[in-house]
Amino acid sequence: MILLSTLLSGWHTIGSPKDIAFYGQIIYYGQYRSVINRREERNIQFSKSTDYALHALLHLGNSERHNNVGIKELAVSLGVSESYLSKIMSKLRQDGIVRAVPGVNGGYELAKPAEQITFLDVIQVIEGRQQMFECSNTNSKQHQLLTEQGEQERKGGSECLVEKVMYGAEQQLHQYLQAHTIQTVIDEALKRKCTHDKNKK
């Protein structure tokens, strides 16, 4: 579960810094859509499919055999059904992130080096590439008050200040996820393991 906790200050926090909800307008990323609901609190989060996709890729990238891994082994490793995981792997295959190896001993393998597969790539494959936020009810007086005039208006459009802030947050999130790859996480995990092994001695 990946949340925007480090980027969107001023949002209401529930329970812990990772649980964030916004009153008034609820924004969902990916397969969800923006909805208006002033009485509910919802989390901003990615789907479980993204979680499983990332962990599956980490398993493939960290495979000691350095070859393909069967769907059964992947499913057992992640604690998820083979049929559900197969649908996720199919999406990753269609986007060129993994490669399916046919045959009795077949399975899946990374289609490109782990350092070239970013978290953003994976999230966009699973969740979609649509914009996270867009203003609703653009004809309202409140919206007009928060719209920048001047140059934008002369060009035939205007920019809502709320949308400007949200778009900036989205861009920061994209940059952060683009900077982290499957390989960087594998390297960090190996570093932690080495540190743990030294401390045990």
Image (spheres, rainbow, N blue to C red):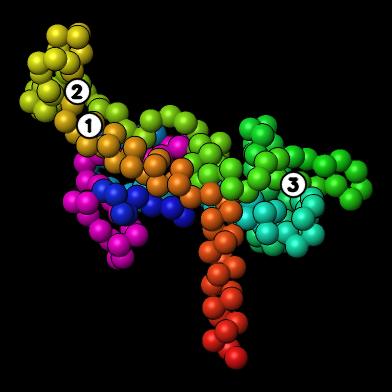
The earlier-in-sequence mark between 3 and 2 is 3
Query: Which residue corresponds to the image point at 58% horizontal and 43% vertical from the top-left?
Result: 117
User: Which label belongs to residue 83?
Assistant: none
The earlier-in-sequence mark between 1 and 2 is 2
Cβ atoms under marks 1 and 2 closer than 8 Å: yes
Looking at the picture, which amino acid does disc 1 mark? Lys
**Which residues are the magenta region?**
9-32
Q: How far apart are marks 3 and 2 (CA)?
A: 44 Å
- Count neighbours of disc 1 (C-alpha within 10 A) and say few if under 14, some if 14 to 19, many if 20 or more: some
Which residue is under mark 3?
A: 109
Which residue is under mark 2?
A: 159
Q: Can I make out residue 3 in this image?
A: yes
Position of 192 relative to 57 (above/below): below
Q: Residue furthest bottom?
A: 201
Closer to the camera, 103 or 27? 103
User: Which label belongs to residue 164?
Assistant: 1
The local secondary structure at tag 2 comes to: strand
Looking at the picture, which amino acid does disc 3 mark? Glu
Q: Can I make out residue 87 in this image?
A: no
